Every structure is written in structure tokens, then in C-alpha cells.
Amino acid sequence: MSKLEKDRLVRFIAKVMEESGFKVYKNYKTSRHVIDVYGILPTVLGDMGVVVACKNYDEHWEVGLDVLKEMEMVGKTLKASKVVVVTSSFFTKSAINYAARRNIKLVDKDGLVAIAKKYSKKDYNENSALVDEGSEESEEYTPSSRSSRTPTFFSGGKKSLSKGKSRKNITPSMNFDRLIPSIKAILHNTIALIIIVLLLSSLVTYIIGMFNKSTAVTGISKILSSALFAYGLVFLVERNPNEVLTKGTLVFFVSMIIYVVLVIIV
């Protein structure tokens, strides 16, 4: 893997993220790691961080679990909402299965080809190093059997990077699909999750209070609804039981503390 090829891959991915609205930092240094691409997407609920590893390997080399686990640790250190691993080759089956469980985005060679074709119209010089001349010309990217669960890249942002059949055939369902990654990114943010739990549980309590004025009933409903939303929303974006239990408990107890503080102040 030459440094020049690696730099081209990093610049290309950084450019794609910038086109999607991210503020991008290349070769971002932490105390223990150097991240190929670190992107920050500003939202109304706060900044959403994304860490990206770019692995420019020969086709016969497959990216394994070690890279995913290392990037996962880096993501937790920076409190990133998403971890992405991009490679010019493919991923091992164990890496694909692990990524599916841990909500890690994988982009393999076929995914890069699809993205490069989409952006070739913008005349990026980096694309020439990424598009394989022997690749089939297809309008829609379908992952190969070696990486059947590997998605392309980001969806959403200022410009969608999902490969569609035609911009003229945009339907409401397609627009809804593009919102899903953004919703998941918001739910990965603990502060945003606490705010959502507070709002939803308050709404439920208010509705119950309209039919039953008992403070005991409204108090219990607030506790139960907070617990339900805290663990339920975390479960939507986390498949690891330990993560659901830990993060759900944190969100629930912080929500309860905020309620107690509000009761004392009011």
C-alpha cells in the first residue's frame, strides 16, 4: 500500500463527506491514534461526529476484526456517532457480522466503485485511482457475494450519496429512507436521547393527566414511560445487550434527576 494511493483514497472520502455537509479533518490526531478522516455534521441537537478508516489494500487482502475493533475504540474516545471503515478490497465474514451487530458502516471495493461513478461527473482527479476500468457499468450498486451486507456509504446530509435509479423518480418512501441514518445518528447522541426521552415521557404524562388528576398516577406514568423510552430508543440503535442496559440506564436516571430538579425549582 503506497502512501500516495492511501492519500488519494483519504482525499476522495473527505471530499465526498464535505459534499454531504460534513466539516472534515484529514489525518486527525488524538493522543494515541491518527484518524484518516474525522467528520463533524452540525445539527440542531448538536454536532454528530464520524470517524473513518481508509484501508487501501490489494484485492486478496481482506479487512478483519482488528481494524473494526480499533476504530470502535477510537469512536468511543471521541464520542463519535458513527464509525466507518472504507477499503479498496473486501471484508472478512467475521468483520461483516461484527459490523452488523455494532452498527459500523462498511464500504468495500464495489462500494467505492459505485461512489466513484456517481462523483465522476464532478471531475475529481482522485477518482481515476478508485474506479476499476474493468468494472461493470451498472446504474445501481449491488454488493458482491463476498460482502453481501456491506453498504455503500452515507445517506442524507446536504446531498444524498445513496445510488438511485433516477433523480426524476424520487418517491416519499425514498426520502423517508434517507432520513433513517440521520435519525439513528441523533439517537446515538446521549444528550439528544435524554432530551427526546424527557419530551416524550412528559407528553405521555400530560395525556394521562387529562383523564386522571391523581399525582400518584401521573408520577408512576412518568417513571414508567421514561424507562420505556430510554431503553426502547437505545435498543433501536444498539444491538449489544450490555450497551442497551448501560446506555439505557444512564439515560433513564439522568432523566429522573432532571425531573426532580425541575420539581424542586418549580
Image (cartoon, rainbow, N blue to C red):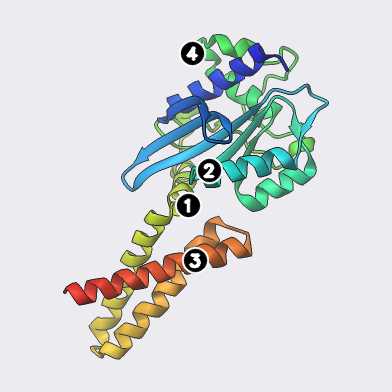
Q: Are marks 2 and 4 in contact (CB under 8 Å)?
A: no
Disc 2 is placed on an element classified as strand
- Separation (CA) of disc 2 from disc 1: 8 Å
Label tally: 4
- Separation (CA) of disc 1 from disc 4: 33 Å
Q: Give the number of the mark in front: 2 or 4.
A: 2
Identify the residue at horizontal 57%, vertical 57% (top origin): 238
Nearest to N terminus: mark 3 or mark 4: 4
Nearest to N terminus: mark 2 or mark 1: 2
Q: Are marks 1 and 4 in contact (CB under 8 Å)?
A: no
Is residue 22 visible in the rendered image? The answer is: yes
Screen quadrant of the C terminus: bottom left
Q: Which disc is residue 82 wearing?
A: 2
Is 65 located above or below residue 196 in the figure? above
- The image quadrant that residue 226 belongs to is bottom left
Q: Residue furthest right?
A: 60
Q: Are marks 2 and 3 in contact (CB under 8 Å)?
A: no
Identify the residue at horizontal 43%, vertical 56% (top origin): 190
Q: Position of residue 54 (x, y in %)?
A: 63, 27
Q: Are marks 2 and 1 in contact (CB under 8 Å)?
A: yes
Left-right relation of 260 to 49: left
- Separation (CA) of disc 1 from disc 3: 11 Å
Q: Nearer the viewer, residue 129 or 180?
A: 129
Q: Which residue is mark 1?
A: 188
- Separation (CA) of disc 2 from disc 4: 27 Å
Q: Which residue is mark 4?
A: 122
Q: Which residue is mark 3?
A: 248
Nearest to N terminus: mark 2 or mark 4: 2
Is 111 located above or below residue 4 in the figure? below
Q: Position of residue 242 (x, y in %)?
A: 61, 64
- The image quadrant that residue 209 belongs to is bottom left
